[in-house]
Image (tube, helix red, strand yellow):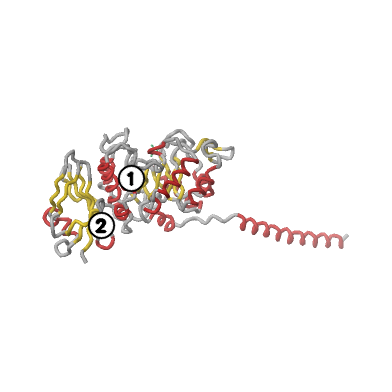
Amino acid sequence: MKMIGKISLLAAAALMILSGNDAFAQKKAKAQAEPEFKPLTDEEYEALAATPPMGWNSWNKFGCNVSETLIKEMADAMVSSGMRDAGYQYIVIDDCWQVDRDKDGNIVCDPERFPNGMKAVADYVHSKGLKFGIYSCAGSYTCQGRPGSKGHQFQDARTYASWGVDYLKYDWCSNDGQNARAAYQTMSEAIKAAGRPIVLSICEWGEGEPWKWGKGIGHLWRVTPDIRDIYDCTFDWGGVGVLQCIDAMADLQRYAGPGHWNDAEMLEVGNGGMTRDEYITHFSMWSLLAAPLMSGNDLRHMSPETIEILCNTEVIEVNQDPKGEQGTRWMDMGDKEIWAKPLSGGEVAICFMNRSDSEWHLDHNWLKQTMYFATEINMKTTEYTVRDLWEHCDLGTTKTNLVKTIPAHGTLMVRLSPKK
Ligand code: GLA
């Protein structure tokens, strides 16, 4: 009896060792199969948007009419039009891709419009050398009544990471009176915990002054209600025009910098509601304001004029300047304004913006007429060359007057570089 007892004890011990080994082997195999999620550090997170994000978003042109086919065609067009080479990166699906949650609470995408699931779409976008973005909302429902992320933030962030999402636009409808900062902080933590680099676009319309708390939580934050394809419209819930977006950005310079940007709203260039000169103002000013450049038109059917504007690399360089300073309004002469953005290497970008309905016959004496500014950049001792960023030609130096006619609603954008 004793002997049997000893044998059974030994057997039990051997079994324990064996099963222990077995558990270890199983754990090892699992770890090899599933890459472990490594949370992003705060530094890694901020580094995701060292310069203002550039891309395309479906909302302005297509509203709820999104599908796998549309997104793939847009990715193709971003490459064939030259936009990818000009710096655009993200293809973002806005509202309406989601229809439900499954029994485990996982978000479900529209099976008819996205028959192969979202990962297939992301894979396609990535295969074109681009990045993939998606939309959700901090409330229970999105602005179009689709399921929002409230109560599912960590689960959704894991889902997005598994699909290969690189950018999340996070809206503010049906927010049930939540505290905005806390709501966006939660999604930010969820993204960091999911371990995939995902840019977070805070779309809170500027209601809770996100410029005061958004840094480190998200990478960009909207400062206005929704833009419309109009140069000038009333600043209310009917939407905002280009001028209202610019004015809303005017005093927010100190809140922008590498990793955190004031978002002047998505672009309307190419959507047909404005003149060429107004679109030039739109694009020049977004670039000068270091605002994200998210195009919102049909990239498959662009006129040469639209491509010329969206792909003006001299203007884009100003937007993407590594110094990351947002431009400011240097002179306000009623309906004529002068804006400046310091660039790296002692250079400066300047916009002469003509808000008026008639031409501006500019005859600008650099030293006399921009006195404060001239002092700031030592114009007395340093001579700068002046380059027209739309006509791509040099316009003399700061020692001579800048003489130019600027059309109604148009903008002259120049770059000043210390003369060698
Ligand atoms: C809000 C946002 C828009 C867009 C729509 C989608 O209005 O501000 O940019 O995302 O929702 O429903």
Return the residue nearer the eye: 137 or 21. Answer: 137
Q: How crowded is mark 1: few (under 14 residues within 10 Å), some or many (20 or more)?
A: few
Dot 2 corresponds to which residue?
Answer: 342
Return the residue nearer the eye: 301 or 120. Answer: 301
Q: Which of marks 2 and 1 is in front?
A: 1
Residue 273: give x, y in percent of width and height.
30, 36
Disc number at residue 304? 1
Task: Using the numbered discs, state the Cα–Cα distance from disc 2 to disc 1 in whole angstroms.
Answer: 30 Å
Q: Quadrant of the N terminus?
A: bottom right
Question: Is residue 222 toward the left or the right of residue 28 in the image?
Answer: left
Residue farthest to the bottom, as pictured: 420
Return the residue nearer the eye: 415 or 52. Answer: 415
Picture residue at 31% right of the left edge, 51% below the top: 312
SS at mark 2? strand
Q: Residue flagged by tag 1: what amino acid is it?
A: Pro
Picture residue at 64% right of the left edge, 59% below the top: 28
Picture residue at 73% right of the left edge, 61% below the top: 17
Residue farthest to the left, as pictured: 368
In which quadrant of the rendered view does residue 93 lie? top left
Which image quarter has ligand 1? Answer: top left
Question: Is residue 365 toward the left or the right of residue 190 in the image?
Answer: left
Query: Does the rendering let one see residue 211?
Result: no
